[in-house]
Image (tube, rainbow, N blue to C red):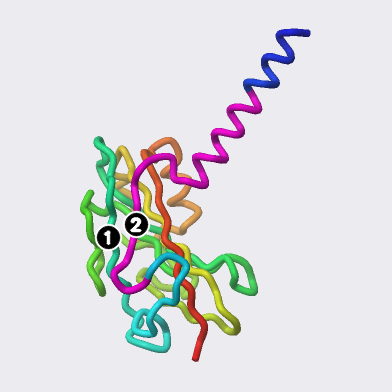
Amino acid sequence: MAMKRLLMVLGFIFIFNIQIFSQTGGGTMKIASSAFAHNQMIPQRYTCQGQDVNPPLTIEGIPEGTKSLALIVDDPDAPMGTWVHWVVFDIPSASTIEENSIPGKQGYNDFGRNDYGGPCPPSGTHRYFHKIYALDTTLNLKEGISKKDLEKAMQGHILDKAELIGLYKKS
């Protein structure tokens, strides 16, 4: 009986730590943009109503041993479920992603393309999650993979994660 309680407590601690890790990113890595602050409006330039180019991003605290970065930009507020705007992987471990750039291999987005597709919500204000992952490997996958396939390939290779949320509403 004591062993069963111990295992239950250890299981609770394990689950609790996983939840904390997923909320904070598990480390010290941070992602930011000079174009917009966390939970603030994304300038029109980076949307379907502007030039539709990716915003500049800065990554700090990349852990030692990082071989590559991966970036997923998606919108969980889309009417039909999460809408994927950009999938990029095998990004060299660097502290910046320049505006209007292709920093690595690109995956397939929900616009049906292998590139950046900016915010373009049908109605209301949507949240756009810019999630950066530090990986202990270079994935060497083919361009055009899906977000789901990228997430599967990253399993067991994530050293740290950070996210930046931008908001957008069509004018």
Q: Are marks 2 and 1 in contact (CB under 8 Å)?
A: yes
The total number of labels drawn is 2
- Name the secondary structure under disc 2: strand
- 110 or 49, nearer to the observer: 49
* Residue for point 25% across, 72% down: 99
Q: Which element carries disc 1, helix, strand or loop?
A: strand
The residue under the point 44% across, 45% down is 25
Closer to us: 154 or 5: 5
Q: Is residue 169 shown in magenta?
A: no
* Among the 4 quarters of the image, the one containing residue 54: bottom left
Identify which residue is drawn at 32% across, 85% down: 51
- Residue 114, by quadrant, is bottom left
Question: Label 1 belongs to which residue?
Answer: 58
- Residue named by callout 2: 31
Q: Amino acid at mark 1?
A: Thr
Is the residue marked by circle 2 packed among few (<14), some (14-19), or many (20+) residues within 10 Å?
A: many
Mark pair 2, 1: CA separation: 6 Å
Q: Nearer the viewer, residue 145 or 132?
A: 132
Q: Position of residue 129 (x, y in %)?
A: 47, 63
Q: Which residues are magenta?
A: 11-36
- The percent position of residue 102, horizontal first and vertical second, equals 25, 67
Residue 123: image x %, image y %?
60, 84
User: Of callouts 2 and 1, which one flags the residue occurring earlier in the amino acid sequence?
Assistant: 2
